[in-house]
Each structure stands twice: as C-alpha cells, then as structure tokens.
Amino acid sequence: MDIIAYIRVSTKEQELGLDVQKIACEEYAKTLVYDNFMIFKDDGISGALCYQKRPGLRNAMETIKKNDILLIYRRDRLGRNVYDILSIENELDKRKARLVSISGEGNGDTEADEFTRLILAGAAQYERKIIARRIKDAMHEKKNRMELIGRVPYGYKLDQDMVHLIINEEEVRVLDEISLLRKSGTSLRDSVQILNSKGIYNRDGPWTLSSIHRIVSRREVVPKQIGI
C-alpha cells in the first residue's frame, strides 16, 4: 500500500499553507503502515478547476492503484466543485483505493459518512462562490475609487500616494493621435507604422500590432473623453 498525499493552496486561500498541509500529511503517515509515501502539490491553483487541469492532483490520480490511500488535509483541498469531487471519489472506488481526510470528516463507509461527504462537497462549492463574489465586489469598489487593479492602464499613472490613478497627459496625447487615425479609416497595421515613424511610442517602446489592438479593442480602461 502506498500513501499518495495531495496538498493544494490557491492565491485566494493563504490561511492554510502548503507547509502546514505537508507536515500534517507526514505526521499522519507515521501512524500507518505503508510501502511508499509521496506528496503531490498544486501551488496557486484554484480548486474550482477539474482535477485533469491541476497537474499535482492529475499526477496523484495517475499514480494511485489498488489499496492505496489518497491523503488530504481536509476535503476542500480536493476541490471546490461538487461534481469534480464526486467524480474523484468514484474513480478511487473503481480502483479500490481510499480517500482519507486528516481532519476526519466523511472518512467512513456508512450512509451517514456518505451524506457528510455530499454536504462538505456542497459547502466547498458554496464557499468558492462566496470568495469569488467578495473578490469581484472588492475589485469593483477599487475601480470606483480609481485605485489600481493590476497593471496601470495606458492613459493613466499612479498618483503620489501610489494607490490612486490619475490621467497621464502625455499618454492621453498619444491616445488622441490613435483616435484620429482610427476616425480617418487608417488600419491598425498602418497606424503602427505611422506612429513609430513619428517617434510616437508605446510605454514600453515602439508600437506593435498587438499592443495597439489591445488598446483599441479592450480600451484598457482608457480615459473616457478620448473617444477611441
């Protein structure tokens, strides 16, 4: 019998680190008799993804054979999608392997344990949706306050407080130039050549087709008065 430990942390869930899970799995394994002990991990990968898209869990599942144990810290480390969690458990059943949660919930084979597993899988999925909603609301609020979210959009720059965005007048003039080219019917490819020939460059250097397309198609949250 082999023990296949799986640990996971996403960028949204930092309170339960990989080190904590790894130590817990190693200590728990000491209480069992086994042939081999292996740990697979997914660092910064959401539990909402199906396990085939999580390299660590996919490799762990490919390794498991009859009588092996898939060891996890707690059941939400396995995933946050009810269907995916149940499909993993079904696959383990087919291989006559077991899933063991160190926290103990749903480890048995009784009807009550099966019901507990269903409740925990649903709770994990519900928590994922709550987390996603909170992040979306927080980003919306930051946007309303004109605070930076990710990369500084072209046409803006950071204010002195290094938090809020203010208009970058120099880049606004470049955007005005792009707007005039678009209104005249100039293609993006020709616009790139014209801008670069005039020495009107992008923030990172000469314009490319992809960089100007990104601004025109996605607008990169450019100042509304520019009218691209």
Image (cartoon, rainbow, N blue to C red):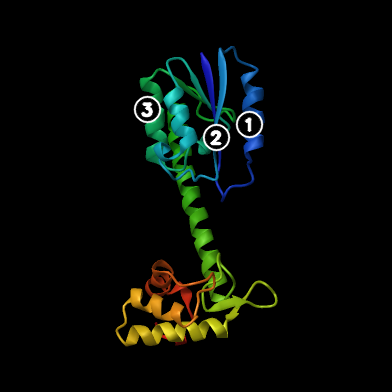
Horizontal side of 131 relative to 163 (left or right) equals: left
The circle on residue 90 is 3
Horizontal side of 215 relative to 164 (left or right) equals: left
Instruction: Choose mark 2 or mark 1, whichever is in front.
Output: 2
Please state the horizontal and vertical placement of residue 144, each as a whole percent of the image: 54, 75
Q: Nearer the viewer, residue 49 or 93?
A: 49
Secondary structure at numbered mark 2? strand
Q: Nearer the viewer, residue 49 or 197?
A: 197
- Identify the mark nearer the N-term, 2 or 1: 1
Please state the horizontal and vertical placement of residue 173, each as a whole percent of the image: 50, 86
| Dot 3 alpha-carbon crowd within 10 angstroms: few under 14, some 14 to 19, many 20 or more | few
Residue 200, compared with residue 82, is above or below; it is: below
Residue 58, compared with residue 34, is above or below; it is: below
Residue type highlighted by circle 3: Asn
Q: CA distance from mark 3 to mark 1?
A: 25 Å
For disc 1, the marked residue is 22
Residue type highlighted by circle 1: Lys
Seen as rendered, the residue at the extreme front is 197
Looking at the image, which residue is at 57% across and 13% down? 34
Q: CA distance from mark 3 to mark 2?
A: 21 Å
For disc 2, the marked residue is 41
Question: Are the residues at dot 2 and dot 1 in contact (C-beta closer than 8 Å)?
Answer: yes
Question: Are the residues at dot 3 and dot 2 in contact (C-beta closer than 8 Å)?
Answer: no
Q: Nearer the viewer, residue 198 or 184?
A: 198
